[in-house]
Image (spheres, rainbow, N blue to C red):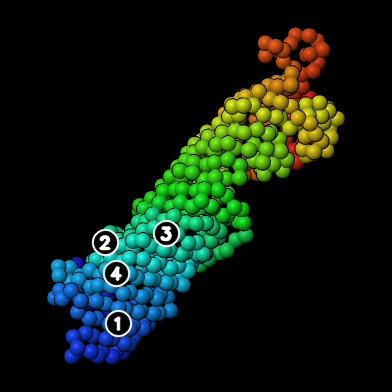
Amino acid sequence: MTSTEGDWETLSDVQAELSGWRKGQIAVHGSFMLRGQRLVVDANLAPSAEGHPHQWALKLSLKGDLIEVAFDGQVNAAEDLQIVGPAELVTVSLRRLARWFGVPIPAAEGLNAASVKGQMHWARHSVAIENAKVGVDGNEATGALLLNMTGERPLIDGTLAFGTLGLDPYVEAARSQSFVFDRPTASWSAFDLAFPLIKYVDADLRISAPKVVLRNFALGRGAATITVRSGKLLAEVAELELHSGTASGQITADTTGLVPRYAVRGKLDDLDTGAASAALFGHSLLSGRAALFADLAGAGQTPAELLRQLSGKATLTLPEGGKLLLDVAALRTAARDGLPAGWATIARGQTAVEPFEARASVDNGVIVPEATPLRGGGFGVGAVGRIDMVEQTLDLHLLLKPTGPDDRATAGSADAAERAAIALRGPWRAPVVRSEDAPPP
């Protein structure tokens, strides 16, 4: 079969029975081979009820191991072949279906079992589905889809509104690839971030859901626009409600080079700093509602490699202040007496802190905070040093000093004695607290 553009497909091993010629219609029952897959066909082609000479009514059923298609509509060949009408497509694997048509995407979780049902319009190399009901990997959505095969790569254009969007299959799809072989890994740091699919498929997708689920954690609303062109991805996240705030921003990925490159510029509003610090450090260290802004970029095949090259800037703002969940007196005692490592010995009290804005630079996975003091409870606490996100370690130097009404260290000798220089070093879930004058642990 040859198209007007010169493209062609071969049907082989055709075994079919045709009937109904004398009644002005054609019924076909049989099977054939297409690209190594056997398809069973049942079809009925009859003249249009309106009597148009170039229109026919078509009822079609096509079944194979990878795909099942049902169609009941019209064929119009007046100028160019067009097929219009209700259709349903079901496949056991979108990935295997894509490979069947020559798109070399790897085998992985996600984008497997899928179904599409709606009003189809097929003309030349373009298939549009309107009023579509879509199911993919257990997620169900309504909207519209378009598959355009005229370009260098297939283009998927769609607007999909999901009831609940489960992200687990797509997280599991991030696994190391070695040529065409899967190398599953249980370690998040070894997941493959190359997203090989975007090298072979272009996309314009608008996705929304009132509920997003990841690893059994139910999040809130989510809406994003995803654009893929020639191995470059741009994701505009309009809104994603998290357990600890609402995220928005822009994510870019460029997989055209030897090593994928990524960048994120975004904001996390209404961040619960208590829950966030507990998740990172194993203990709540600062409570309050904050805004976190980040502008970061890096390159790497895996998250661990990406963290080692991650650089940029970040800002944390507590516009209404909060509470530092550290006992200043216990901190001084732990530093002087050399108490065991860990937050438990110093996180026994709390100190109200005034509104503040903390800035930091990120250099190859190391956070370097600017010397922004926290003020409250009659004390000022300043910190300089580094936080290594790859090794998950701290090397911070704290200066504690009493403050007066004019926000400056008071001059009395007793107040001067209250000043303390403290080192906080080691794993960030169990750091060692020592006086700067004490020998290192």
Q: Where is mark 4, residue-wise?
A: 85
As drawn, the label of residue 150 is 2
Residue type at the position of mark 2: Thr
Q: Which mark is residue 43?
A: 1
Residue 371 or 51: which is nearer the viewer? 51
Q: Which callout, 4 or 1, points to the residue nearer the camera?
A: 4
Residue 327 horizontal side relative to residue 12, left or right: right
Task: Give the residue at x 60% y 37%.
Answer: 271
- Quarter of the image for residue 16 reads bottom left
Q: Secondary structure at mark 2?
A: loop
Is disc 1 in contact with disc 3, using a CB cutoff of under 8 Å?
no
Q: Position of residue 208 (x, y in %)?
A: 46, 51
Q: Is residue 103 left or right of residue 53?
A: right
Which mark is on residue 361? none
**Of marks 1 and 2, the one in the foreground:** 1
Q: CA distance from mark 1 to mark 3?
A: 28 Å
- Number of callouts: 4
Which residue is tagged 3? 142
Give the spatial CA distance, label 4 vs label 1: 15 Å
Q: Amino acid at mark 4?
A: Gly
Lower position in the chain sequence, tag 2 or tag 3: 3
Q: Position of residue 234 (x, y in %)?
A: 41, 47
Between tags 4 and 2, which lies in front? 4
Marks 1/2: CA–CA distance: 27 Å
